[in-house]
Structure formats: C-alpha cells, structure tokens
Amino acid sequence: MNSPEPVIDANLAIALDALLAEHSVTRAAARLHTSPAAMSRTLARLRRILQDPLLVRAGQTMVPTPRAQSLRDEAAAVVRSLGALLSPGTGVDPASLRSTFTLQAADLVAAALAPGLLRLAQQEAPGVSFRLRAEELEAGTTLRDGRIDLEIGSIDHVDPETQVEELVSLRMMAAVRPGHPLTERPLTPARLAAAQHVAVSRRGRFTGPLDIALAEQNLHRRVSVVLPSHLAAMTLATRSDIVCLVPAALSGAAPSPLTDDATALGLCLLDIPLALPPLTIGMAWHPRHTADGAHHWLRNAIRRTLRTPGSQTT
C-alpha cells in the first residue's frame, strides 16, 4: 500500500526559513508576527516532519543541526519563490519581458502607434515585439478567444465582459493637397459639399457623420470612392482634388500622433464649419488580462504613445 502524499504547507516553509535565519523561537515569532508559543508548536511539527531537531540548545542560545544548515539556503529560496508567485502581476519588470503582443487597429491608428511603441520598448522592454493586425468585422470575439491582446480605435462592438478605456477625443478635419481650390477662400459647408470626397470604411459605406451634418444644411456631398484604408485615402488626396477626413487634436489640446502621417504627406488641414461629433479613440481588452503585469505595461505604453495625460492606469 502506497504511503499518502505529504501535505504541502507553505506556512511551514516560511516558518522554517525564519527559524533557520534567526536561530531563536522568540525572534522568529516576532519576524512572522505570531506568538512564541505558536512558533514552538510549529518547530515541533517541523521536527516531526523532517525527523531532525533542527535547532538545539547550546547554553543560552540555539544552534542549527547539520541538516538545518543544509536546508537554510533552500528554505530561503522557496520563500522568495513564494513571494514572487503571490505578488501582484502588475509588479513585473518590463526589462525582463519576452513577449509578443498582438494588437488590432485601423491602419491610421497602427501607423500612429508603431513609432512610439517601438521607442518605449527599446527604452524599457527590449524583449517585447508587436504584431499589428487590421480591423476585423468580428473584433469582439478575437479578444475573448485570445487571438489579440488589445484592440485600439473606435470601440463600438464589444462583448459584455470586455474592458474598455477611452484614451483621447479627436475632431475631424478636411485634408486636401496644397493648392487645392478649397484652400483659396474660407471653407463653407456649401463649398465642402461641392468637392469630391473619398470615404474610408472597411464595410464599404459611403456615408458617415459628415453626411448627416450636411443634410441638416440641406446639402449633399459626392463620395467618388470608398477605400478601406485611411493611408490610401490620404495618398489619393495628395494626388488629386479629392477631399479626405483626418482626425486631429481638439482645439487647444496637444497635437495627436494620428495626424502625423497627414502632415508628413504635406496635406493641408482645414477646419470643417459644421458641428461634427468627436471621434473617441479607446482600447479594449479581455478582463483576464487586467491584472497581468505584461499587459499592464502594454496598456500604459499605449496611453503614453497617444499622449493622454491623466488617463487611468488599470
């Protein structure tokens, strides 16, 4: 008949470490915030389990047995391991991370994020790499099944348990090539509506908030082409008289990295003389990652890259 498996008691390992470090029941009890009587009972239990006296009286002090001396370093290592195992996950050292994070975002958001994320990773977490995926129609389920770690963008299709944090609010501006006719005079709703437009939609939609605002003025714009990519739409605007919409920081706010590519392409950004709803960029993740230290670093890196002072740090 097989003997029963020994019961693993982490408290015994902690008590053993304290006793072997202090060579005193009283001092070990004080170290663990317990009574000397309770520590004496624990020492007696350890002696029975290990079949060794561990600490023996030598005059007014107690000295370790050879078995105790051999166990001292091992006991200390076990306690350190237990401490690391039971520490909050957010205490991870970024420099020790060896992770690949999969992010899902529209191309404009991905292009704005990538330089800042790489810079932060090089400075703080050189073992981290990123895989950026295009938006999918079923983005919510990819968080649940673990195909992506984080979704960044306009979050409007999440499962009930998904955690969502708003990062920044932006306004839409009209982007045109230098010398475009719309740059020659103040922009009015009628002049904006009369221009040719490109719409960006991964679902192929021709209309959006701008069309609703124009309709309130009894105006209708002509969308000549729908593209799935913001970067492609901006490139088209540099080579034609097409107007595209570009997100930019709210008036008085710090510049947004989501406008950097439009600026790099040399596009002129014009204020739209209509009341459009702000564009809210957020991030979404599955709650199983909330307390994970690596994911905590990732979320903070996203916040810092998108320049959002005062954001929560969950």
Image: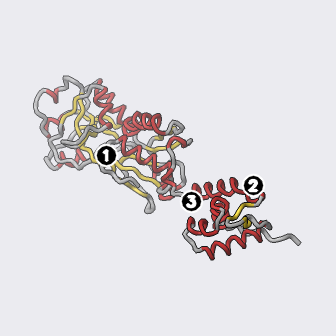
Mark toward the viewer: 1 or 3: 3
Mark toward the viewer: 2 or 3: 2
The secondary structure type at the circle numbered 1 is loop
Left/right of residue 238 with respect to residue 37 in the rendered view: left
Q: Residue furthest left?
A: 185
Task: Choose the circle earlier in sequence order: 2 or 3.
Answer: 2
Q: Pinpoint residue 125: horizontal percent, then vertical percent.
A: 49, 39
Query: What residue is drawn where x is 51% and y is 43%?
Result: 101
Q: Pinpoint residue 7: horizontal percent, then vertical percent.
A: 72, 69
Alpha carbon separation for disc pair 1 and 2: 54 Å
Work out which quarter of the rendered image holds the N terminus and state it: bottom right
Q: Amino acid at mark 1?
A: Thr
Task: Choose the circle earlier in sequence order: 1 or 2.
Answer: 2
Residue 308 circle label: 1
Task: Choose the circle earlier in sequence order: 1 or 3.
Answer: 3
Work out which quarter of the rendered image holds the C terminus and state it: bottom left
Alpha carbon separation for disc pair 1 and 3: 32 Å
Total of numbered circles in the picture? 3
Q: Amino acid at mark 3?
A: Leu
Query: What residue is drawn where x is 40% and y is 41%?
Result: 106
Q: Nearer the viewer, residue 122 or 222?
A: 122
Query: What residue is drawn where x is 69% and y is 70%?
Result: 43
Q: Pinpoint residue 160: horizontal percent, then vertical percent.
A: 43, 62
Mark toward the viewer: 1 or 2: 2
- Which residue is labeled 3 in the image? 86
Residue 70 circle label: 2
Residue 116 lies in quadrant: top left
